[in-house]
Image (tube, helix red, strand yellow):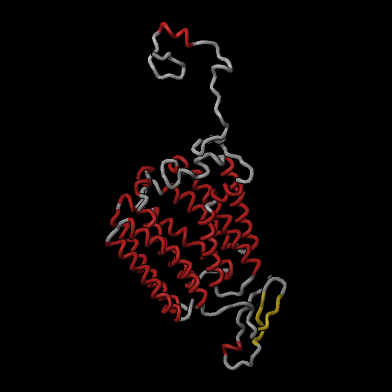
Amino acid sequence: MRSASPCDNSIVPVSQVKDISGPVSKDNVIFPATNIIPDNHTSWLPSPYTAIGKTISQYKKLSKFRLTSLVVVTTMGGYAMAPAAFDLSSFAMCTLGTGMISAAANAINQYHEVPFDSQMSRTKNRVLVTGQITPLKSVLFAAVSASTGLCMLYFGVNGLTAALGAGNLFLYTSIYTPMKRISIVNTWIGSVVGAIPPLMGWAGCAGSLDSGAMILAGILFAWQFPHFNALSWNLRPDYSRAGYRMMAVTNPSLCRRTAFRYSLAIVGLSLMAPVLDVTNYWFALETIPLNAYFAYLAYKFNKKSDSKSSRSLFRFSLLHLPALMLLFLANKKEWYFKKNAEEETIKTDSNYMVLKPSKTATSLGNVLPVAVAEGPR
């Protein structure tokens, strides 16, 4: 019969406890043979997580860098499509200012949604949820980004662009964000938010908005529905758990129909672009296959909504928008790289007056000045 030892799993009588117990010493303490931590060891990090070298990455996540980049690209597209001369300084200010405002809006959005993001698999690892950035720092980041972006737009571009930026910031943070938990109308409001950046680019270049700007904004507005509705379809359990009122959760049939209807709207708006002199007529022909396939995927999603059809629609939407913007640029009606060489422009104290055309006047329209601005009295 073998004797019991401290490492034995046998039942030891109480009378023998005194024999196996004793003072702790080097002789009866088992030390690990190695100090290597296993691969599956869980490391606990301080909150907030302040590791050197991670700060830039954390703030990129706070600003939703990829989403902000898409906003900037659509702004650049609006600037490039505007019927005015390209100016590098205003283009840079418009681009950077819009990016700063978008980063601020995303930071404020995450600040408000921490309790709800923690309940969703897709967002539970965001920097505010995990404590990598404190709420105070996120608010300060948003305040600095918003104020810097608005100053860049107002002083470096024009007042109209700054007003559009400020309005979009308010719309996203103060209306869209709380509306997500109240009504499915939030999707339409969010689509308006997505349609404003190309208007900012257009206004930054031309100083005003016209029908061409509305075509661009209309396409961006319509594109949001097949893009987001397809994305939200596979996230219904997450949205439902967090209490968000999304079409995919509260009205799935409307979610599918809306995606398909607005994909058809993109086809119609693209055909209107040459009619309104935004592009040439080649644009209408070139976009038909692209938009038709997009509408076909939305139709499949409408008829048979499953994870496969929703993923196909969502993934193609990420290719569809950049391709459509490139076709816009390739088929722009007229490029304005410099001022019209057929006109002599003389600068006065506070205005510009076109005094005469360079060619001989052949009609009454050529005799009249193109633009007359009355100076201060």
Identify the image quadrant of residue 229.
bottom left
The answer to whether 178 is drawn above or below residue 1 in the figure is below
Residue at the limit of the structure toward the top, as seen here: 15
Q: On the rendered structure, is 260 left or right of 140? A: left
Q: Is 219 on the left-hand or right-hand side of 47?
A: left
- Up/down of 331 relative to 238, above or below: below
**Residue at image x 32%, y 50%?**
249
Q: How many labels does the image show?
A: 0
Residue sitting nearer the eye, 160 or 1: 1
Task: Please state the horizontal and vertical placement of residue 55, each as a whole percent of the image.
Answer: 61, 46
Report the front residue among 233 and 216. Answer: 233
State which quadrant residue 356 falls in.
bottom right
- Image quadrant where one finds the N terminus: top left
Q: Residue at x 53, y 64 (%)?
A: 73
Residue at image point 30% right, 56% down = 306
Residue 241: x and y in percent read: 36, 42
Task: Please determine whether, in this image, residue 286 is positioned above or below residue 5.
Answer: below
Q: Is residue 94 above or below residue 6?
A: below
Among the 4 quarters of the image, the one containing residue 5: top left
Looking at the picture, tell me which residue is in the foreground, 48 or 350.
48
Image spot of residue 58 (x, y percent): 57, 47
Q: In the image as oriented, which residue stretches furthest toward the front?
A: 1
Answer whether residue 377 is visible to the viewer in this image: no
Question: In this orientation, does residue 177 appear?
Answer: yes
Q: Indicate the quadrant containing the C terminus: top left, top right, bottom left or bottom right.
A: bottom right
Q: Where is residue 181 in the image (x, y as percent from the top left)?
A: 39, 46
Q: Nearer the viewer, residue 328 or 377?
A: 328
